[in-house]
């Protein structure tokens, strides 16, 4: 059974607007996410718009589609992975030093059985896969932090 909530967060020494510009440009997702190799937005950044993605883990590549669920400029961006219905979100909060970003994966009702089967077959079980997802979130957030701070201070 998938964990209901996986989450990571980071504080970035740059204004919310700078961080939002990076996160909301979905073409750049491959720069942040260790698993996402390509993400194409098929329409405006608004609920209902689909994206087409190529993911990679070691030598395994697989396509996915997502549907954007929520866009609150400079506050929240969320999209649903259509195949397993997990919701990924980035939430931005203004803090004294700049911006706090919280990345989450919600799978309240679990994920579809095929995803569990795939996780067990290809990646040694869901626990390992979910640990990797959280590690991946931490890597993504660190990369966004680095880019935002370079942009802001450069």
Image: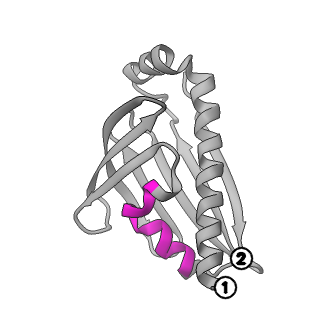
Q: Residues within 10 Å of mark 2 (few under 14, many from 20)?
A: many
Tell me where residue 119 appears, x and y as whole percent: 48, 21
Q: Against 102, is 111 above or below?
A: above
Q: Is residue 118 magenta?
A: no
Query: Mark 1 and mark 2 in contact (Cβ < 8 Å)?
Result: yes
Determine if residue 85 is in view: yes
Q: Residues within 10 Å of mark 1 (few under 14, many from 20)?
A: few
Q: Name the image colouring.
A: one colour
Which of pointers 2 and 1 indicates the residue nearer the eye?
Answer: 1
Q: Residue at x 54, y 81 (%)?
A: 17
Tell me where residue 95 appears, x and y as whole percent: 73, 76
Query: Please, what secondary structure does the residue beneath circle 1 have?
Result: helix
Q: Does residue 4 appear to the left or right of 62 in the view shown?
A: right
**How far apart are the alpha carbons under marks 2 and 1?**
9 Å
Q: Main secondary structure of the magenta part?
A: helix
Reading the image, the residue beneath label 1 is 153
Q: Residue at x 62, y 84 (%)?
A: 152
Tell me where residue 92 appears, x and y as whole percent: 59, 68
**What residue range appears in magenta?**
18-30
Q: Name the residue at the left extreme.
A: 43
Give the position of the C terminus as an image quadrant: bottom right
Q: Name the residue at the front extreme.
A: 59
Label located before the other in sequence (2 or 1): 2
Quadrant of the image occupied by residue 150: bottom right
Reading the image, the residue beneath label 2 is 13
């Amino acid at each position: 059974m998938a964990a209901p909530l996986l989450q990571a967060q980071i504080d970035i020494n740059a204004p919310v607007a700078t961080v939002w510009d990076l996160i909301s440009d979905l073409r750049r997702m491959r720069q942040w996410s260790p698993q996402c190799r390509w993400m194409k937005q098929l329409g405006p950044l608004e609920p209902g718009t689909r994206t087409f993605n190529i993911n990679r883990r070691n030598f395994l590549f697989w396509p996915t589609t997502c549907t954007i669920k929520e866009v609150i400029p400079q506050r929240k961006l969320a999209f649903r992975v259509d195949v397993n219905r997990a919701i990924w979100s980035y939430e931005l909060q203004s803090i004294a030093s700049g911006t706090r970003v919280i990345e989450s994966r919600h799978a309240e009702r679990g994920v579809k059985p095929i995803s569990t089967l795939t996780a067990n077959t290809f990646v040694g079980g869901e626990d390992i896969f979910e640990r990797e997802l959280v590690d991946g979130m931490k890597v993504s957030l660190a990369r966004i932090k680095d880019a935002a701070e370079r942009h802001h201070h450069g």
